[in-house]
Image (spheres, rainbow, N blue to C red):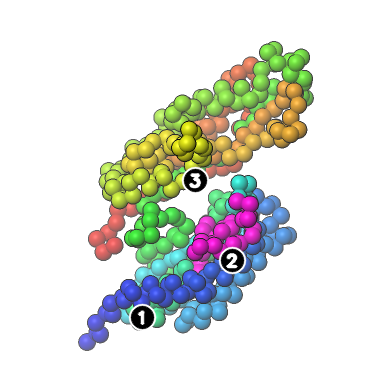
Amino acid sequence: MNAPARQLETAALAAYADAAWDQRIVPALTDYIGVPAKSPMFDAAWAEHGLIDRVVRDAATWVDGRQVAGLKLEVLRLEGRTPVIFFDIPATKAGSSDTVLLYGHLDKQPEFNGWRKDLGPWTPKYENGLLYGRGGADDGYAVYAAITAIEALDQQGIGRPRCVGLIETSEESGSPDLPAYIAALNTRLGKVGLVVCLDSGAGNYDQLWLTTSLRGMASGTLKVEILTEGIHSGDASGLVPSSFRIMRQVLDRLEDSATGRLLPASFHCEVPADRLAQAQATAAILGEEVYKRFPWAHYDCGGSTTFALPTTTDPLQALLNRTWLPTLSVTGAEGFPAIQDAGNVLRHWTAFKLSLRLPPLVDAAAAVQELKTLLEDNAPYQAKVTFDSGGGATGWNAPAATPWF
């Protein structure tokens, strides 16, 4: 007769996780934050700099040091590609045939300005229970959380399936190297019944949250050229159209600037009924926190503080806007001198880096091609308008949850 399955003791689990976080994970993440291991898209010389290799080596050493029973770990390096960590831990539950795949990444977005004076992207600081710095939450914690979760189950004697981990280092560049590694590991992954992607957010810290969909993305650089060199504005303005104004006209084809709504119908899709129901339930739980959690600009006005406003204060619409509606963001610009260096010169070109979030069911490749045609054709004033695509990634919508889950 089989022994009855042990029940998870949640209080003990919480205590174990809290101790692991403070004693082992925070120190590891502190070291990780201090390494500017930028993704290949943002550091073309990543291999020469060795920073991605360093965070991979540090994480692999940490995992090996935990001495999880039966764990086997490898750092895999396909020619010309970023490395991955692959670990394999045998099942402790009798009769379990499926495998759980735990995914995360260690590469980082580039640094950005706007940090508080005593903080910085590569200078970790632990303050009031919060660890500041670049990459800790996206997604440096993943491998440490995955191993700790397995350790917590094993400590309580809770049977579990075989677990494998795949921690990549090209995710912030659109994961161009991941498919090659999945193909190389195909026979070793086994029968994967559940994938846990440790790279998302949470509505609050009072319950468990699952991400059921992700928007896709199309990106690229839009450049407008009207002259071959800058000309004094006192001589040329009014006759030579501003490259910035032409840029505005071109972007007006894509976005209604008054509302932020993207104009091409093909960039939209219908929200599935189950996702709408989930959004309604989530909105009822989180309420105003859906939009109030962001760091809105504010100023004093007549003795009271006035805050900048979101596109909507309806919690349901706010959730749908950031999960199922397409949205344009300008994430970078060139052709502009710094304000302190800007004279009265009409600039000869303007370039914007565009980031277009696409609904989960919209094909990114088709959207990129439509975007290029929309922006380049019939340029105002016959200016030279080019859109250099940075590629795209189609979004993801989870299948309906099975009853056991």
Residue 132 magenta-highlighted: yes
The range drawn in magenta is 116-144
Which residue does the numbered mark 2 point to in the structure image?
A: 30
Question: From this viewpoint, which residue is outermost toward the top?
Answer: 239
Residue 242's place in the image compared with 54, above or below, is above
User: Mark 1 and mark 3 in contact (Cβ < 8 Å)?
Assistant: no
Tag 2, which secondary structure? helix
Whole-Å distance between the Cαs marked 2 and 3?
24 Å
Which residue is at a point 47% across and 39% down the rendered structure image? 305
In the rendered view, tell whether residue 371 sits above or below residue 1: above
Q: Residue furthest bottom?
A: 1
Give the labeled residue for mark 3.
Answer: 295
- Residue 276 in the figure: left or right of residue 174: left
> In x, y percent, where is residue 194?
38, 64
Residue 156 is marked as 1
Residue 229 in picture, x, y percent from top left:
77, 25
Q: Kindly identify the amino acid type of the residue bearing the numbered disc 2.
A: Thr
Q: Residue at x 24, y 82 (%)?
A: 4
Question: Real-space Cα distance between discs 3 and 1?
Answer: 40 Å
